[in-house]
Amino acid sequence: MEKTEKRQVSVPSAPAANGRITFVDYIRVIACFMVMLVHASENFYGADSSGLAGNMSMLATESNRFWVSFWDGGVSRTAVPLFMIVSAFLLVPMKPGMSMTDFYKRRFMRILPPFIVFLLLYTFLPLLWGGMSWDQSLNDLRLLPWNFPSMGGHLWFMYPLLGLYLFIPIISPWLERATAKEERIFIGIFVFTTFIPFFHRFVNAELWGECFWNEFTLFWYFSGYIGYLVLAHYIRVHLQWNRSKRFWVGIASFAVGAVFTAWSFWLKGNPGVLIATPDIEWAWQFCTPNVLLATFGAFLLFTCIEQRQAPALITDLGKLSFGMYLMHMFYLAFFAGLLIGGDRANPLLPVWLCIPVIAVLTFVSSAVTAKVLSLLPGSKYYIGA
């Protein structure tokens, strides 16, 4: 029965003639741009000296409050979980006969060398234009074995991604034999865990065995990005929805999740008031129910793309997207400084336009740079392409 279900799956998962899955390349390109929208938006509420969102935030105007809520919360908050879902959609379960060591070697050799290169670049390169001091650079270097450098905050994403890669060989055998019902049970518990950030905030700071000597709580092993991994497998193997149903459920899910996510920031944003970033971003964590719902909807919408093969530009950008993500903060900081000019209340362009313009300029510059670098020998070791 299970084999029959897999043959009848309605989500397009067969690769095109070029070996790529069309809608996945669209996700890579658009999610990459969404990441840049997120970071462009941060320049309009982060109170950190870098302009990005650090521990404290402050909105300058009501316009900033609305448009950050819209572009960052409503439009782009699904970027990170979409990347997680894509990785799981392509890699889970592992190919028949592949061992754990083979999987680790293949995946880690693809992403670890470029990751290490950019850890070092964000540690030292800003010294060239006075973007950091030698003391800061040396301190970042000392901490590199343990975490990302201070100028490369976006590289946090690499650690949970690597964690998922470590776990894929463990969970693959279960997914190969799990029934749709068994996967739904797991996903149901995962969905419940996405409410835990709200329980922490509105019910109690410690839940289900949580205390200063134990962070491994009752639902610990069902929480986090592992839920997106199982969800991706369930959609690929067990979801028997036709294109029309995926489209309308996708529209509704994304709209409801995105509106709530945007509203949550707008609700707490009070122009002119310094506020702790976790308080203003109280519903912006990537494993919250609203972000999960919006991500589920967005992914379903992408599966409705019927092109047998994506245009060459999309395919090319999809291949370059990892390198673009790694390098984009160098360009974004430059364009944000140019267009904001140190005055977030009065940038050179209206805020509603300034945020996407910063993102577009960053995206194009990163794409051109990544493309040029991809033509050089050994490019897979420093941009992954």
Image: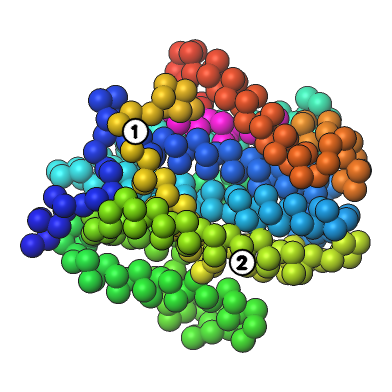
Give left or right: position of 284 versus 44.
left
The secondary element bearing badge 1 is classed as: loop
For mark 1, what is the residue?
A: 307
Residue drawn at the location 24% of the way across and 50% of the way down? 10
- Region rendered in magenta: 318-331
For residue 274: magenta? no
Residue at the limit of the structure toward the top, as seen here: 376
Q: Indicate the quadrant containing the C terminus: top left, top right, bottom left or bottom right.
A: top left
- Examine the rendered structure and indicate whether residue 374 appears above or below residue 236: above
Q: Nearer the viewer, residue 189 or 380?
A: 189
Place of residue 383 in the rendered image (x, y in percent of width and height, measured from the top left):
51, 27
For mark 2, what is the residue?
A: 260
Place of residue 322 in the rendered image (x, y in percent of width and height, measured from the top left):
50, 34
Residue 232 in view (yes/no): no
- The quarter of the displayed image where residue 237 is located: bottom left
Residue drawn at the location 70% of the way across and 39% of the way down? 356
The secondary element bearing badge 2 is classed as: helix
Q: Amino acid at mark 2?
A: Phe
Residue 115 in view (yes/no): yes
Q: Nearer the viewer, residue 382 or 346?
A: 346
Residue drawn at the location 66% of the way across and 43% of the way down? 37
Q: Nearer the viewer, mark 2 or mark 1?
A: 1
Residue neighbourhood size for the residue with mark 2, other residues' Cα within 10 Å, grouped as few (<14), some (14–19), many (≥20): many
Residue drawn at the location 47% of the way across and 52% of the way down? 298
Give left or right: position of 72 versus 129.
left
Its colouring scheme is rainbow
- Examine the rendered structure and indicate whether residue 14 appears above or below residue 319: below
